[in-house]
Image (cartoon, rainbow, N blue to C red):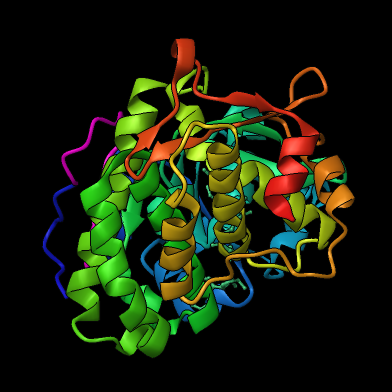
Amino acid sequence: MTSAHPEPLQLPLPYPVYCRAGVRQTIGEIARLVAPSHRVAVISDSAVAPLHADAIVAQFPADSTRLFTVPPGEQVKTRATWAELTDALLEWGAGRDTTVIAVGGGVVGDLAGFVASTFMRGLPVVQVPTTLLAMVDASVGGKTAVDTPFGKNLVGAFHNPAAVVIDPEVLNTLPEDVLRSGFAEMIKHGVIADAPYFDAVLRYAHAVRDHGASAPDFAATITTLVIGSVRIKAEVVAEDTREGGLRQILNFGHTIAHAVERVLNFTLLHGDAVAIGMVAEARIAESIGLAREGLSLAIADAVERAGLPSRLPATIPLDDIIAATHGDKKAREGSARYALPRSIGEMEAAEGKWSVAVSNAVVKTALS
Ligand code: NAD
């Protein structure tokens, strides 16, 4: 552990990303540097708060800092919770001189980020991701949102964080299934942009599947992999901050994943749904001739090595999944669009477009 002032990673982003064991102990210092303010609102969930958020609150003056918690789980990522949090901030007296610190997984990051983006037309937010998935994906890129009955993330805003502070040590308290589910987005980063990174994730997935955070050399290896993923994501979002083009490749696996999550009423971990979605969407790419046969098997092998599901639960009616893909915000003019891989490390970009319209019949065959 260190208390020396940390150096951010060298990334093409307009905000600093810190990634180092022990860096959570300097969040007070980092927040004062990137977003000096009168008040600090720490937003977390009730499972993460006693483990990690309380110690962050303690780094700020008690009379101008408040912890706000929500119950854990995707079910709270709603407009109703957004309203409760903004009301609680108003009641406390938060104003434009307030910095929000989001301490938690992707749910807290998206929710607190959306609160910060809308409260008094925008407050600075420091993202402190505490799940592997949020470290490698959700905390970087500035997307914030809540879910609606019509689909996931349908109400939200682009709101860049003032800083992202990643401390891999907090992964030690993460339940093993949640830790494993983070590997889905890491595998995705390899598929969409970087074959050597895909291989590196694959080499370590087995160890984490079998031993969780007690896997050999966990701290050093996971830090290297997290930095690798953050770099890939940063390079993509730096080129396309508002998802007009290239950034759509980050949606690989997600059109099906969001449909599965919705049909299963958000009872599946997001990473598990992404694992199923990547295999199904690779199969779609094979069946329309974009990818060679074998790509979906390679991705299925990768997700299975990480201990993640590679196929849909047999009980889900395929027509429900197809219908749910049309509620996804990537659906245009009645046909669902998919960001599809050509091979590991390369995405389809026909005529400069990074997503492809696919008929329901093709999707259904790929899923069955
Ligand atoms: P999550 O936030 O629900 O966290 C999973 C569980 O882990 C929760 O029960 C939480 O309480 C617990 N937890 C978190 N950190 C812990 C820790 N260190 N120790 C012990 N328990 C801990 O799930 P998630 O997988 O992190 O995030 C999924 C969400 O992220 C989805 O809503 C998804 O849409 C969103 N997401 C957003 C983006 C983006 O770009 N904004 C990208 C990917 C995913």
- The quarter of the picture where the C terminus appears is bottom right
Identify whether 120 is placed above or below 57: above
Q: Quadrant of residue 58?
A: bottom left
Left or right of 220: which side holds 336? right
How far from the left and from the top, in percent, is residue 288? 59, 32
Q: Residue at x 15, y 55 (%)?
A: 6
Residue 100 visible in the shown view:
yes
Q: Residue at x 25, y 53 (%)?
A: 197
- For image coordinates 29% across by 86% down, the residue present is 215
* Magenta span: 9-23
**Image quadrant containing the N terminus:** bottom left
In the rendered structure, the answer to whether residue 91 lies left or right of residue 113 reads: right
Q: Position of residue 5 (x, y in %)?
A: 14, 56
* Number of dots carrying numbers: 0
At horizontal 31% and vertical 82% (from top left) the residue drawn is 207
Magenta-colored stretch includes residue 81:
no
Question: Residue 204 appears at what percent x and percent y?
Answer: 28, 73
What secondary structure is the magenta-colored segment mainly?
loop
Q: Quadrant of residue 183?
A: bottom left
Q: Could you say which is closer to the camera, residue 227 or residue 58?
A: 227
Image side of residue 313 versus residue 300, left or right? right
Rendered location of residue 54, percent (x, y): 48, 74
Q: Would you say residue 33 is visible in this rendering?
A: no
Considering only vertical position in the picture, is 343 above or below 248? below
Quadrant position of ligand 1: bottom right
